[in-house]
Image (cartoon, rainbow, N blue to C red):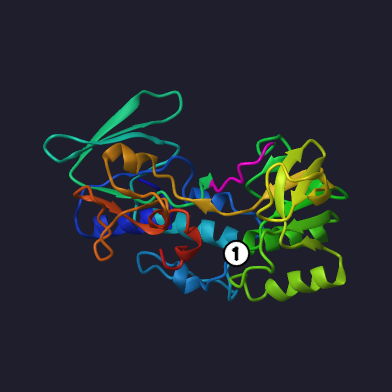
Amino acid sequence: IGGGPAGLAAAIAAKQRGLRYQVLEQGALVNSLLHYPPQMVFFTTPELLEIGDVPFVSPYENPTRPEALRYYRKVTDAFALEVAQYEPVLGLTVKPDGTFHVRSQRAHAPHRDWIAPAVVLATGAYDVANELGVPGEHLPHVSHYYQEPHAHYRRRVVIVGGKNSAAEAALDLYRAGASVLLVHRRAALGESIKYWVKPDIENRIKEGTIEARFLTQVIEIRPGEVVLAPPGTEVPPPPELQTVVPADAVFLLTGYRSDTTLLRMAGAAINEEQGAPVHDAETFETTVPNLFLAGAVIAGRQSGRIFIENG
């Protein structure tokens, strides 16, 4: 379940060992990569993106998103992998004999039922955003995903977050002519920001072309403005601790987590503190026999520690 790099790698391994298998993907092939910003450059080098021992050839030290999409299409074709796209899984249950009943359905089509002795969940950690839980979070001008900058030319944009996604979006928007304010709860940007991005964003903040407010949190989002306050203040904070800033668009780039819905359907144990499935660190088997994990789904809310090169 899941047609990203980890799911495709599992499918290749299954095919090479003569197993009957089926990949079910709710969106397009490598759907998470498809929804990355078009101009994104990977942190990693090409060989660490490889699956199935198929070389990833790139002229760049850090490959681009279009290159990765092309690579995974070619690998899927080279192995003639059985991948059903745009077919989300609606149900995952364990039958009395220990086999799995998987129900999937494409749009405008009858559902399909699959019976399998084993299931690999490779659903990633990009579909569920870490929400702030503040009023106005779901207004039309607010998004947890960043795509392209052009629509925000000469507009006032607030970005919430302090890691790679926030830093790259801030730079991209600034260079496209947006007025950018970066808001982060902590005292400084995250240390894990890509080594070529970190000095760039820090210099832009230092020179004032990108405004940054550290030790600051969002209290409320309203049409056209955002209310800020120091972290840990009571909600609502007293007026003297509130700052209202204008915002034509707001990007809440505060990370993502894996979706545990199917795991819970199957009865797998979840570490509620981490939002992650309990599993054997050697075999990646969950607490449900023959229900396995692959890739970033194991990380729960700590999605930053499992990514494409080590998933």
Which residue has dot 1 on it? 64
166 and 240: which one is in front? Answer: 240
68 and 294: which one is in front? Answer: 294
The main secondary structure of the magenta stretch is loop
Displayed quadrant of residue 169: bottom right
Residue 7, image x and y in percent?
37, 53
Q: Does the magenta stretch include residue 46?
A: no
Query: Left of 99 or right of it: where is 65?
Result: right
Residue occupying image coordinates x 69% and y 59%: 184
Q: What range of the chain is rendered magenta?
A: 129-135
Query: Left of 119 or right of it: where is 106?
Result: right
Q: Is residue 260 above or below residue 111?
A: below
296 and 182: which one is in front? Answer: 182
Secondary structure state at the residue bearing disc 1: loop
* Quarter of the figure that contains the C terminus: bottom left
Residue occupying image coordinates x 73% and y 63%: 214
**Residue type (three-letter) at the residue carrying disc 1:** Thr
Residue occupying image coordinates x 80% and y 48%: 242
Residue 48, image x and y in percent?
45, 71
Badge 1: how crowded within 10 Å, few (<14), some, or many (20+)?
some
Q: Does the magenta stretch include residue 133?
A: yes
Question: In the displayed image of the protein, which residue is found farthest to the left?
Answer: 97
